[in-house]
Structures are given as structure tokens and as C-alpha cells.
Image: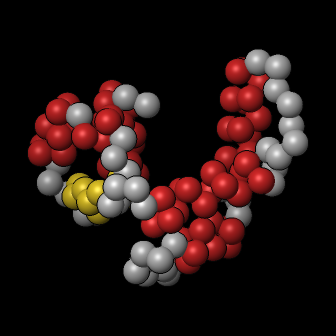
């Protein structure tokens, strides 16, 4: 992940959601890059807040990765990076069809998020 990919993602997000957004970010270097900061300054409908450092229990995506590692990807052996990447992407995409499971990751986080 780098600043260019973050900016590309934000562009796609803005194209699909025409409303103000608050982005909750971890402290990945790409999220804090000058280019990303400049992009955000040009698009005031995007507001960012950072998770506190060393608080993975607040970040719902950590529960997604934990689920993937302990469930569909558990006990699988990969012989090359391409095979691992393809399999992981397939399982991540399958989560898109499981909104109840995704909501459970949000509910498990102690963040005071409102779910619809």
C-alpha cells in the first residue's frame, strides 16, 4: 500500500458515495503521506480520524483479518505468493456477500459506531 493507491481508492470512494465521509484510519505511512494530505485538502467532504496507536481492538478490520486467518485460510499451505494472494482475495470478496458477519466485526469493536 502506498500513497498513490490510497488516493486511487479515495477517488473511487468519492465516485460511488456523493456525501461527506469520515474515514477512520490506522497509522499506516501511506495514510499520513504528504500526497494524501494534499489530496484530502482538495476534497473537504473527506474527513479523517486516526485510531489511537497500539489499539488494534478498536479497528474492525483487525477482526476481519482474524476471521480470515482462523477460518477460511486456516491450515492451508501455499507454495507461492500468487497462490496465497488469489486465495486471500477470493475469501475477502466472499465476505462482501455476508453483511451480517461484517456487521458483527463492527459490533465487536468497542468504538461507539452507529449501525443502520
Residue at (86%, 31%) from the top-left corner? 77
Does residue 21 show up? no
Residue at (70%, 21%) from the top-left corner? 81
Residue 10's spot in the image, x, y percent?
34, 43
Residue 18's spot in the image, x, y percent?
31, 58
Where on the picture, by quarter, is residue 114?
Answer: bottom left
Position of residue 35 in the picture relative to residue 77 (left or right): left
Whether 44 is drawn above or below 37: the answer is below
Residue 54's spot in the image, x, y percent?
40, 56
Question: In front: 114, or 75?
Answer: 75
Whether 107 is drawn above or below 18: the answer is below
Q: Residue furthest front?
A: 54
Residue 48's spot in the image, x, y percent?
25, 56
Question: In front: 115, or 70?
Answer: 70
Position of residue 47 in the picture relative to residue 12 (left or right): left
Residue at (62%, 57%) from the top-left corner? 64
Question: In front: 10, or 14?
Answer: 10
Q: Which quarter of the figure is the N terminus placed in?
A: top left
Does residue 77 show up? yes
Where on the picture, by quarter, is residue 36?
Answer: top left
Residue at (47%, 77%) from the top-left corner? 110
Whether 86 is drawn above or below 10: the answer is above
Amino acid at each position: 500500500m502506498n500513497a498513490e493507491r490510497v488516493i486511487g481508492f479515495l477517488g473511487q470512494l468519492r465516485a460511488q458515495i456523493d456525501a461527506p465521509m469520515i474515514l477512520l484510519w490506522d497509522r499506516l505511512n501511506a495514510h499520513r503521506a504528504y500526497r494524501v494530505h494534499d489530496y484530502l485538502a482538495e476534497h473537504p467532504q473527506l474527513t479523517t480520524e486516526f485510531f489511537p496507536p497500539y489499539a488494534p481492538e478498536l479497528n474492525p478490520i483487525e477482526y476481519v483479518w482474524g476471521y480470515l486467518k482462523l477460518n477460511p485460510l486456516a491450515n492451508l499451505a501455499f507454495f507461492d505468493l500468487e497462490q496465497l494472494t488469489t486465495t486471500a482475495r477470493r475469501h475477502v470478496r466472499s465476505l462482501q456477500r455476508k453483511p451480517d458477519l461484517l456487521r458483527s466485526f463492527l459490533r465487536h469493536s468497542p468504538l461507539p459506531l452507529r449501525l443502520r
